[in-house]
Amino acid sequence: MKYDFCIIGAGLAGLSLAKELSSLSNTKILVIDPLGIGKGASGSPIGLANPATGRYATKSWKAEESLNLLEENLEKVSSFSTEKIFSKSGIVRPAMDSKIAKRMKENVETSDWSDGSCKWLSEKELHNNFPDLFCIDGGVWVPSGMTVAIPKYLDALASYLKVSGVDFIEGINFDIRKLNNIWFLDLKSTNEIEANHIVITAGIKSTRYDFWKDLPLHPVKGQVAVFKTEQKFPYRSAISALGYFAGIDPYTFVAGSTYEHKFANEETDRKGLSYIEDRMLRVMPHMEGKYKLLEQWAGVRASTPDRKPFAGDHPHIEGCSILAGLGSKGLLYSSLLAKEFAHFLLDGTAISSEVSLNRFN
Ligand SMILES: Cc1cc2nc3c(=O)[nH]c(=O)nc-3n(C[C@H](O)[C@H](O)[C@H](O)COP(=O)(O)OP(=O)(O)OC[C@H]3O[C@@H](n4cnc5c(N)ncnc54)[C@H](O)[C@@H]3O)c2cc1C
């Protein structure tokens, strides 16, 4: 089979890019993943699309645009899932001490948030809306924030792409070589694949490809825990403080996550669970003794020196590009990045300098 684009890696980056390329052009696209859809960092059971990020709720890069495009994509593919894939029920960010509260309040008041999309709540206002949540001096309320069941979103997105004519190969190993400006993917069990252009979207595994081995990607392991409760989980909105806590259904919620810069393996462990529980009970002390562990999950994020993703062409090899380094904001950024990158690949429109690969020598 011959393709215009072969996207290598079927996580948030790869599938979002396939969606943009297929809706903007008539090109023939293949998505290939040796493990399967969402088998990397995008396998996190829940992710928050949170535009007020970091300890002090700083407005993220192109916050509103990222959220709007993500929401459009979520809406578009929702009918391809029998389950709910996202909820736009907002995110609350209680301040854990008075220094954080002060910085958060300043950030909200000095950033150019569009009307009502992010606001400061006094301690009393926060407790009226989120009883029993620990906070000092108040917190930030982000009504536009979303909670997304990422694996369900990716399954729905893949179904949408298949109907739109994008081909998929999953769970098969392959070798890549280039001959006379054509890329060849040698698969053991299928006919040879040819592609004019390859795009690596393999998350932290992107540097396994020799031609990207010098990329400054840093692995950060994250663990989350899924808990069951006997009484309803008390909050519809997600909570982001010392991690994040968000309901999947009334009696199940996800708590995460760890940020492990040094780790011996990619598995979940008891230490990760204790870390998550400890932080969860500082934010929601009333949950003590009211939950049971259902499962744990771990994945490895690909972080970059300036914590911004990178998108671009290989400096020396033609027809070879990358979209990686989505770090801890991959869900939030995925749709916007994919749109910018698809335009770049199709008609050469410049990528925003903040995420362009050119910013690294
Ligand atoms: C615990 C945790 C919680 C998170 N929470 C949030 C959140 O709340 N909000 C948010 O915005 N972001 C969150 N993130 C970050 C987000 O999940 C990532 O930024 C995003 O998933 C990265 O997507 P990706 O497609 O670049 O990489 P990945 O999701 O890692 O996808 C890479 C794909 O490549 C495949 N692959 C592996 N090896 C190869 C190979 N050799 N060749 C080709 N393909 C290969 C994998 O199977 C995988 O499918 C979280 C991450 C973690 C780990």
Image (cartoon, rainbow, N blue to C red):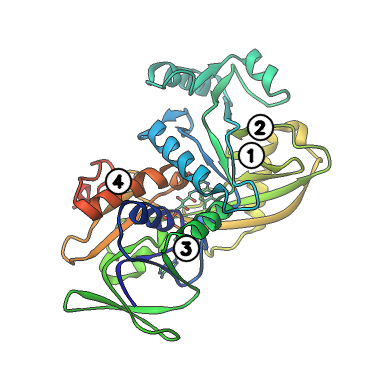
Q: Secondary structure at mark 3?
A: helix
Q: Which residue in the protein does label 2 denote?
A: 283
Q: Position of residue 216 (x, y in %)?
A: 31, 56
Callout 2, which amino acid? Val
Q: Secondary structure at mark 4?
A: helix
Q: Badge 1: how crowded within 10 Å, few (<14), some, or many (20+)? A: many
Element at label 1: strand
The Cα–Cα distance between marks 4 and 1, rounded to whole angstroms, is 31 Å
Label number found at residue 340: 4
> Ligand 1: does it lie within 8 Å of the C-beta at label 2?
no
Q: Nearer the viewer, residue 207 or 202?
A: 202
Q: Mark 4 is on which residue type?
A: Glu
Left or right? Give the position of 286 relative to 243. right
Q: Are marks 2 and 4 in contact (CB under 8 Å)?
A: no
| Mark carried by residue 15 | none
In this picture, residue 213 sits left or right of residue 167 = left
Q: CA distance from mark 4 to mark 3?
A: 22 Å
For marks 2 and 1 on the same chain, the one whose residue lies earlier in the sequence: 1
Percent from the top left, x then y, of residue 239?
61, 33
Which mark's residue is nearer the viewer, 4 or 3?
3
* Residue, disc 1: 245
Would residue 143 be visible to someone looking at this image?
A: yes
Residue ID for mark 3? 162
Q: Amino acid at mark 1?
A: Phe
Q: Residue at x 49, y 23 (%)?
A: 118
Q: CA separation, marks 3 and 2?
A: 42 Å
Residue type beneath disc 3 = Lys
Dots 2, 1 in contact, CB < 8 A: yes
Residue at x-position 49% and y-position 32%? 55
Q: Position of residue 164 (x, y in %)?
A: 43, 59
